[in-house]
Amino acid sequence: MMKSEELFERAVKRIPGGVNSPVRAYGSVEEAPRFIQRAEGCKVFDADGNTYTDYIGSWGPMILGHNHEKIREAVIRASENGLSFGCATEREVEMAEFICERIPHVEMIRMVNSGTEAVMSAIRVARGYTGKTKIIKFAGCYHGHTDAMLVSAGSGVMTSGVPDSAGVPKGCTQDTMIAVYNDLNSVRQLMEESRDGAAAVIVEPVAANMGVVPPKEGFLQGLRDLCDAHGALLIFDEVITGFRLGFCGAAGFYGVRPDLVTYGKIIGAGMPVGAYGGRKEIMEMVAPAGAVYQAGTLSGNPVAMAAGLVQLRTLWEDQEIYTRLCRKGEMLFDGIRKILMKKGIEYQVNSVASLGCMFFTEHPVTDYATAKQSDTKAFSEYFRYMLNQGIHMAPSQFEAMFLSDAHTEEEIGETLDVIEGYFSGI
């Protein structure tokens, strides 16, 4: 028995499902999770001594690669002064100044401890600022596991979300309305039916939790226009796209300015951290400056801030990183498209820069309903083959592949050879 299998047998006895987050579960691909011991560059190493080329990257934040030397050194130096104070530190100020001085749509920012917490807080601020209660989200977009965001993600427009998890009372989701991603008319319909009662529209500007689904041309600007017309705030959930598509995230990449933006662990170089920010007059609603309460004992943790500052400074000072990432994304995802075309297989490959996903369906994927048409059994077989060939991906059809600056063209080429080998054998 593999060490990972032994660890999983122990884990299921003490941890629900044997994992501390459902995205780590391998049940849908009929495998035991690989237990990772260490990582370096674009490689991860499991408890059984296997080496994998990694396309998870801790779900996105390892944009410079795993265990980056400068980040590691910053963490060690910060740890020598203590791990947590629960008090104000200089690094919190440096982080806030660094982001706000470089990102036009972030005039003030508040640190939190996760993307989920950032979204929860941004929604509360939007309601406090507008005096409205309704929130519009999109089917298939994930915004963390707070009650109001855990709503059924159906294929049609829903004016009142239905809880998608046990333990969530109906009252917690009655003000969450569900629109269809890439469909402006569905948003317009909800705005009108709510009689302009929507405090905000929250969106993943590139949907990356139903696989990768890019916005159609004009979709994000259309959301901006609808929010302006109906007195709602536009919130970009950039937990995945922030500092990845470019230093200014999807907002800069697509040239659309949100009112509020949420970030995740990428601003901590992979450590547990998040943030939300936006226009000054909105953010000044947050306590202790304003009447919208939000707090966090460990927010702005000095070790996480030290790691994050090194990563963000590196990205700012060498923005050729984004050029390299786009080139690598083209090599990988265009390479997959060419393999499929050569083999006469009509699966879909969606990608934006260094984010991408192959959908096991013949139909174009533009929203949650079309993503769900994918053949998850076929994906499972593909996943197992790739894992056994040393390619580490998310164990789900509906997750993204993440490239880092540490991936080389040689390693991407080797990945494409493995993919071609799989499709040559089916």
Image (spheres, rainbow, N blue to C red):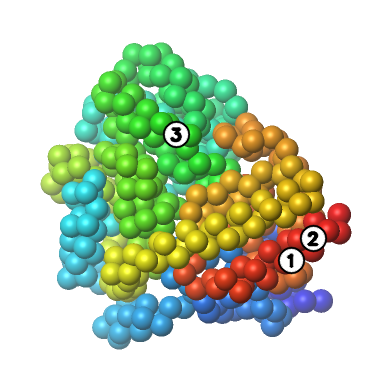
Mark 2 neighbour density, 10 Å: few (under 14) some (14–19) many (20 or more): some
Disc sitting over residue 217 in the figure: 3
Identified by mark 1, the residue type is Val
The secondary element bearing badge 3 is classed as loop
Identified by mark 2, the residue type is Tyr
Image coordinates of residue 117 in percent, x first then y, are: 38, 50
Q: CA distance from mark 2 to mark 1?
A: 6 Å
CB of mark 1 within 8 Å of CB of mark 3?
Answer: no
Residue depicted at 37% across the width and 66% down the height: 320
Find disc 2 in the rendering and name its residue: 422
Disc sitting over residue 144 in the figure: none
Identify the residue at the far right of this view.
425
Residue depicted at 44% across the width and 34% down the height: 217
CB of mark 2 within 8 Å of CB of mark 1?
Answer: yes
Find disc 1 in the rendering and name its residue: 418
Give whichever of 241, 326 is nearer the camera: 326
Image coordinates of residue 302 in percent, x first then y, are: 28, 72
Reply above or below: 344 against 75. Answer: above
Identified by mark 3, the residue type is Glu
Q: Earlier in the sequence, mark 1 or mark 3?
A: 3
The secondary element bearing badge 2 is classed as helix
Mark 3 neighbour density, 10 Å: few (under 14) some (14–19) many (20 or more): few
